[in-house]
Structure formats: C-alpha cells, structure tokens
Amino acid sequence: MEKYSNLIPQPQTRFVKIRCPDCGTTMVTYSHASIPVKCPKCGKVLVEPTGGKALIVAEIVEVLR
Ligand SMILES: [Zn+2]
C-alpha cells in the first residue's frame, strides 16, 4: 500500500481575539466561523464565512489556543 501523500491538512481551528477597526471593541470569535460575526457595539461585520477559513476583516489582537 502506498502511503497517503495528498492528505488534506486539517485546518487549525482556534479562537482569536479581534478588535473592531471602527470602534476599537475587542471580542473573541472562532477563526472558522460559519456565520458572519458582527461587532457587538457598532454592528460592523468583522468575520465573513467563506466556506473554509473565515475571512477576518478586523485586527487580530491575540490567537488563543
Ligand atoms: Zn465596532
């Protein structure tokens, strides 16, 4: 048997602390969110789901493991 050489790497799922670029509010969200994450204060969309890794449009302050 051949070794599997084309295994798709599992995406690292983790929580990240992000900061809203508009109002500076920090919040913790999932790095692979499947629904849009909005800033709780001003309503700006900070994380957009893309089907895989979410697109984070906010500043990432800290990556939580
Ligand atoms: Zn905000």
Image: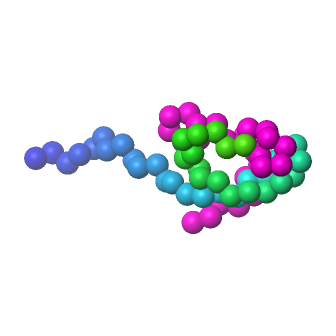
The structure residue drawn at horizontal position 46% and vertical position 49%, both measured from the top left corner, is: 11
Scheme by which the image is coloured: rainbow
Find out whether residue 24 is within the magenta segment.
no
Q: Nearer the viewer, residue 48 or 10?
A: 48
Residue 14, given in percent of the width and then of the height, sits at 55, 57
Q: Outermost residue, left direction?
A: 1
Q: Is residue 56 visible?
A: no
The structure residue drawn at horizontal position 10% and vertical position 47%, both measured from the top left corner, is: 1
Q: Quadrant of residue 35?
A: top right
Q: Look at the picture and state if 19 lies above or below 45.
A: below
Residue 8, given in percent of the width and then of the height, sits at 36, 43
Residue 29, given in percent of the width and then of the height, sits at 64, 54
The structure residue drawn at horizontal position 30% and vertical position 41%, both measured from the top left corner, is: 6
Asked if residue 50 lies left or right of residue 44, the reply is left
Q: Quadrant of residue 53?
A: top right
**How many numbered marks are there?**
0
Q: Nearer the viewer, residue 63 or 49?
A: 49
Q: Outermost residue, top direction?
A: 50
| Quarter of the image that includes the C terminus | bottom right
Find out whether residue 46 is within the magenta segment.
yes
The structure residue drawn at horizontal position 84% and vertical position 43%, both measured from the top left corner, is: 42
Q: Quadrant of residue 44?
A: top right
Q: Look at the picture and state if 30 lies above or below 62.
A: above
Q: Is residue 16 visible?
A: yes
Asked if residue 58 lies left or right of residue 32, the reply is right
The boundaries of the magenta stretch are 39-65
Q: Outermost residue, bottom direction?
A: 65
